Amino acid sequence: MIATLKAVEASQLQLVEREDIDDEEDLFESIDKLISAGINTGDVKKLQDAGIYTCNGLMMHTKKNLTGIKGLSEAKVDKICEAAEKIVNLGYITGSDALLRRKSVIRITTGSQALDELLGGGIETSAITEAFGEFRSGKTQLAHTLCVSTQLPANMRGGNGKVAYIDTEGTFRPDRIIPIAERFGMDPAAVLDNIVYARAYTYEHQYNLLLGLAAKMSGEQFRLLIVDSVIALFRVDFTGRGELAERQQKLAQMLSRLTKIAEEFNVAVYMTNQGCNSKLFSFLIFP
């Protein structure tokens, strides 16, 4: 029975590349389209070097931030934004159009039927899901399970996509992925190959890793970003009440970046946090 399941899934669990989702409407427009709109190739390269790979992502930046990119003047930024606005419609749409967009949202199973029901079907793409609770309450274990379930095909309540994992506390254990993959009848080696992992050591490093994800997500199909945990490095890098305001500002920028990634690339963002006295952990979902 297990051998049959593995044989069936072997043909199903091949992660699709961009050409395999031709039936879906493109969720984002490549930044390269600016070239055909009259923008200099060199200026487009400067945007990519700054971590901007889609027109959608470009429109999520303020002009102040864009002029901060070396080599881009205010006049160039105005011209770039004007060209991007013609490619991407970020203005008003009808409720019917909004409903159609919501149909692209995927709910990824957590591997637990009871937890899926609690979350309305699983972890949602285009949204942030935060699990918070005491140490050893299962937050990281769920992250490991999601690394596998995200790679399941849609008919098995998966996301049929890759996973990006940012580890701020050194808790990622690839050996724990193996039994979870076997439980779902998947090839552990293939599952591990479809997880891109990075260890962050400072809050600045953590933010820069998020900026670097744009290049990967614009070229490959990702469905999940894990940050475990989101605030650990902020507790270390900022101390005392005197730095509280700066810490909150930097944390807000981090959360804003996570929200933009979720919406720009239609990925689920799962982040953990320690901040609950209960032995059970809770969830917050930011659509």
Image (cartoon, grey):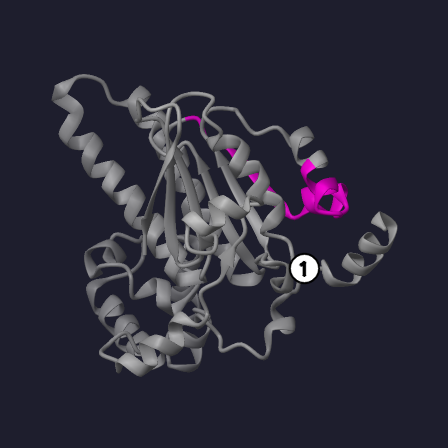
Q: Secondary structure at mark 1?
A: loop
Residue 282 seen in this snapshot = yes
- Pick the front one: 191 or 120: 120
- The 10 Å Cα crowd at callout 1, few under 14, some 14 to 19, many 20 or more, is many
In the image: residue 94, left or right of residue 192:
left
Where residue 19 appears, as percent x and y from the top left, is 64, 73
* Number of numbered discs overlaid on the protein picture: 1
The outermost residue toward the top is 240
Quarter assignment of residue 48: bottom left
Q: Which residue is mark 1?
A: 15
Quarter assignment of residue 231: top left
The answer to if 129 sits in the magenta stretch is: no
Where residue 92 appears, as percent x and y from the top left, is 22, 79
Residue 216 seen in this snapshot = no
- Pick the front one: 55 or 259: 259
> Is residue 200 depicted above or below 269 in this figure?
above
Q: Amino acid at mark 1?
A: Leu
Where residue 160 appears, as percent x and y from the top left, is 61, 59
> Is residue 168 depicted above or below 35 in this figure?
above
- Pick the front one: 177 or 230: 177
Magenta residues span: 180-201
> Is residue 271 depicted above or below 75 in this figure?
above
In the image: residue 225, left or right of residue 241:
right
Where residue 63 appears, as percent x and y from the top left, is 21, 61
Q: Which residue shows up at 23% across the image and 77% down it?
A: 91
Quarter assignment of residue 264: bottom left
Q: Which residue shows up at 34% across the image and 56% down it?
A: 260
> Is residue 27 depicted above or below 159 in this figure?
below
Q: Which residue shows up at 58% across the image and 43% down it?
A: 147
Q: Which residue shows up at 83% across the image and 48% down it?
A: 2
